[in-house]
Image (cartoon, rainbow, N blue to C red):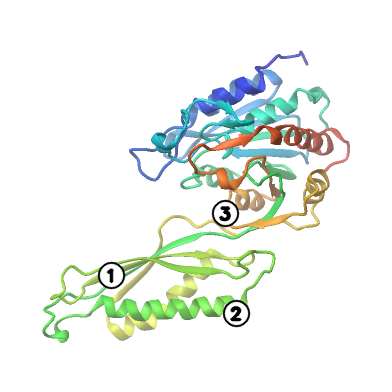
């Protein structure tokens, strides 16, 4: 394989930061990530990677990148997302779309969370004999992690890539993360019957029914927290937060409709679809008794809890390389989708979660050398050594 001279690490980082790729549920703010995907493809293809660009269903302006070098039944995926959250430029001390170095830190939107991970991968490859891989190395870049996780969902639906191990470079402060809770953001809507407030018999009060629904949800939460517990988490029980309540239109009208939005964070071993159905079943008696309609629906598709066995070879390797035992975190990642495809998955990256989604997001320069060495060690172990399956 001919030697290909790629740009310096700082040049690579500068380029990905200056390519805006904000994802947002607000369509006026939402942006394409194709410029980042195309740039990564242009860097990886000369290194011998086979490039596949997967447009998202119904969103051709967004895409995933699957770059594969080598073949075989095992192999390693190095994964991350190419999108960022929105930002308020007025709160930054430098242009968020220009890499800025000061105080031994690199500043820029996405440098920590987490476009900056891809230049680090490319930099790590400089010392790897890429023509001697015995198992495949796959670089995976996804879309829309910060909003819908549509990119990871599309990959899981397609059943690719196929590999034995996957490392996601989300900001964990160089600490391996093998477990996190899931996320369910749900809405309960009650449709009653409005009427004049002077005579309750003229209507069916949705607000009063919602009071009973909320009491039932709190009872359900109590039962969940008695049944499920994992001391590895800072908050060791599943949580259910009643977040938003809306209803009615005037004090002198019987409340005709009411909606509640809540957040449920299940532990590993709990299944979102089953939890949603359990809530539906518990609310049916209220609907029958009050003669109202009660709908339970997701605000967006849930994210399942994630757990990789602590004895996994990847977990053990990263514990040895970092000096830290595998941990749990409160935030969610794309890891459950990779686990569902049969990969032992771990979350580990050089940034800190405290910097994610913040003005003046940065990556400390001191984190770069150990992250490069970790990436090289993992590639050597899972792609260069024989017999990894």
Q: CA distance from mark 1 to mark 3?
A: 30 Å
Give SS at disc 1: strand
| Residue 63: assigned label | none
Quarter of the image for residue 100 reads top right
- Residue on which the image places disc 2: 226
- Residue on which the image places disc 1: 258
Q: Is residue 115 above or below residue 288?
A: above
Nearer to me, 281 or 6? 6
Q: Which residue lies at the image location 25% right of the left edge and 68% below the top edge?
A: 247
Q: Estimate the x, y position of residue 112 in percent, counting from the top left.
A: 59, 38
Q: Is residue 296 above or below residue 336?
A: below
Q: Is residue 278 visible?
A: yes
Q: Estimate the x, y position of residue 353 in percent, counting from the top left.
A: 59, 47
Q: Is residue 108 above or below residue 177?
A: above
Q: Upstream in the sequence, badge 3 or badge 2?
A: 2
- Residue on which the image places disc 3: 331
Q: Which residue lies at the image location 84% right of the left edge and 41% below the top edge?
A: 388
Give SS at disc 2: helix
Nearer to me, 188 or 376? 376
Q: Estimate the x, y position of residue 45 in percent, counting from the top left.
A: 65, 21
């Amino acid at each position: 394989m001919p030697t290909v001279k790629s740009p310096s690490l700082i040049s690579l980082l500068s380029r990905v930061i200056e390519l805006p790729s904000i994802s947002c549920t607000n369509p006026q703010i939402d942006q394409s990530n194709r410029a980042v995907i195309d740039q990564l493809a242009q860097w990886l293809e000369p290194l011998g990677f086979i490039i596949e660009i997967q447009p998202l269903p119904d969103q051709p302006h967004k895409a995933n990148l699957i770059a594969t070098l080598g073949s075989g039944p095992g192999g390693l995926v190095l994964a991350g997302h190419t999108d960022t959250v929105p930002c308020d430029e007025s709160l930054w001390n430098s242009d968020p779309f220009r890499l800025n170095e000061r105080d031994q830190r690199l500043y820029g939107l996405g440098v920590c969370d987490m476009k900056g991970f891809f230049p680090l991968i490319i930099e790590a490859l400089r010392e790897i004999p890429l023509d001697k891989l015995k198992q495949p190395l796959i670089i995976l870049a996804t879309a829309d992690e910060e909003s819908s996780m549509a990119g990871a969902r599309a990959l899981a639906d397609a059943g690719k890539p196929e590999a034995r191990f996957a490392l996601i470079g989300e900001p964990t402060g160089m600490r391996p993360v093998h477990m996190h809770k899931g996320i369910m953001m749900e809405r309960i809507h009650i449709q009653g019957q409005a009427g004049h407030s002077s005579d309750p018999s003229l209507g069916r009060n949705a607000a009063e029914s919602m009071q009973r629904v909320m009491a039932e949800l709190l009872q359900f939460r109590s039962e969940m927290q008695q049944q499920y517990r994992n001391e590895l988490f800072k908050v060791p029980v599943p949580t259910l937060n009643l977040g938003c309540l809306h209803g009615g239109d005037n004090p002198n009208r019987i409340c005709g409709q009411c909606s509640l939005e809540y957040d449920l964070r299940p532990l590993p071993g709990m299944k979102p679809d089953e939890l949603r159905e359990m809530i539906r079943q518990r609310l049916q008696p209220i609907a029958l008794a009050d003669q109202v309609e009660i709908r339970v629906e997701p605000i967006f598709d849930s994210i399942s809890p994630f757990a990789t066995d602590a004895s996994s070879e990847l977990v053990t390797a990263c514990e040895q390389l970092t000096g830290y035992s595998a941990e749990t975190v409160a935030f969610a990642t794309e890891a459950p989708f990779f686990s569902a495809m049969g990969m032992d998955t771990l979350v580990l990256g050089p940034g800190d979660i405290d910097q994610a989604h913040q003005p003046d997001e940065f990556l400390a320069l001191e984190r770069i050398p150990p992250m490069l060495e970790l990436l090289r060690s993992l590639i050597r172990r899972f792609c260069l050594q024989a017999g990894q399956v």
